[in-house]
Image (cartoon, rainbow, N blue to C red):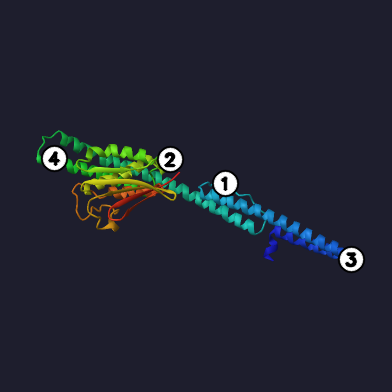
Amino acid sequence: MKYLIDKDNLKFMISILFSVTLSFLLIKINTILAFIFISISVTLITYQYIKKRDVKVSEMVQFLKRLNQGHYDYDISSYQEGELSKLQTELNKTTITLKQMNMHLSQQKDLLQKGLEDVSHQLKTPLASLILLNELQDEDELVIKSKEQLERLKYLVESLLRLIKLDAGIEVFEIESFKLDVLMEDVISLVKPMLKDIVLDIDVANIECMGDYNRSKEAILNVVYNKLRHADTKISIKSKKEHLSSILLISDDGDPVLNKNRIFERFYTGDKRDVKSIGIGLAIAKEIMNKQGGALTLEGDNTFVFRFDML
């Protein structure tokens, strides 16, 4: 009996019963005519019922699509009593709940961002003062070491705040189309002064990529800086297309990475510890790629592989 609570179902059943009853009356006049009548009427009634039902289901599907896209202002139309009415009521309740949760998360994100900005200001101000005081001192061994440690501490503070922002989803990524070879030209111009005896072997094609240009450049720079510390004589940078991805491969002729499982771990500096390394650059690079829908992995002995979506 629950099936008949829905007025659409009830109308459908009444229409079918009416057609069947009328066909029985027509049998007394003409059997073939009765058969044709029942066939056509049942087909039309069923078609109208399914079509009306399909419109309502399509509206609910559209409602769910907009809901998944974060649009909470869309109100699905009300139905009469029945199965779809119950579903519509629950969907509207879900919309209200998700809207409230989204507002709460947005408020929490704003508070977190403000808190991070305050922490950043409170940390950077005394650091800047200490660095300035060191600049005013006579250059001796103690002052030089102090400068190095202060610069290292400054970089650590900035990197930690950056990671927190990435983890919290506070940073906004501007996803756009860019050419991989143009991006690499910018990267190389920043790296060249640091090469010394290291040779760059570059073969990057004019491949279209999707991502945040500046943050992608930062991620690649972090990997190249890592290579500068580990390469013997050469760093190779290649590109290729693979299915729907643009691939950038960065390798060097140095020793293989021994602990591959920990290479992207925060504060991991490797077995051959570099006193200047904090062990956070690769972690930031990987997080940047993840946040913009790409990927950064280590393949082979020491090849870092960037994967960007193609346009």
Dot 1 corresponds to which residue?
A: 74
Dot 4 corresponds to which residue?
A: 144
Closer to the camera in the image, 67 or 208: 208
Q: Which of marks 3 and 2 is nearer the N terminus?
A: 3
Crowding at dot 4, Cα within 10 Å, few <14 / some 14-19 / many 20+, comes out as some
Q: Which of marks 3 and 4 is nearer the N terminus?
A: 3
Q: Which of marks 1 and 3 is nearer the N terminus?
A: 3
Front of the two marks 1 and 3 = 3
The residue type indicated by label 2 comes to Glu
The residue type indicated by label 1 comes to Tyr
The residue that appears at 25% across and 54% down in the rendered structure is: 268
Query: How far separated are the C-alphas under marks 4 and 1?
Result: 63 Å
Asked if disc 4 and disc 1 are in contact, CB closer than 8 Å, the reply is no
Instruction: Describe the element under mark 1 as helix, strand or loop.
Output: loop
Asked if disc 3 and disc 2 are in contact, CB closer than 8 Å, the reply is no
x and y percentages locating residue 66 in the rendered image: 54, 48
Q: Which of marks 2 and 1 is nearer the N terminus?
A: 1
Crowding at dot 3, Cα within 10 Å, few <14 / some 14-19 / many 20+, comes out as few
Query: How far separated are the C-alphas under marks 1 and 3?
Result: 55 Å
Query: How far separated are the C-alphas under marks 4 and 2?
Result: 43 Å
Dot 3 corresponds to which residue?
A: 28
Dot 2 corresponds to which residue?
A: 176
How many discs appear?
A: 4
Closer to the camera in the image, 268 or 309: 309
Q: Which of marks 4 and 2 is nearer the N terminus?
A: 4
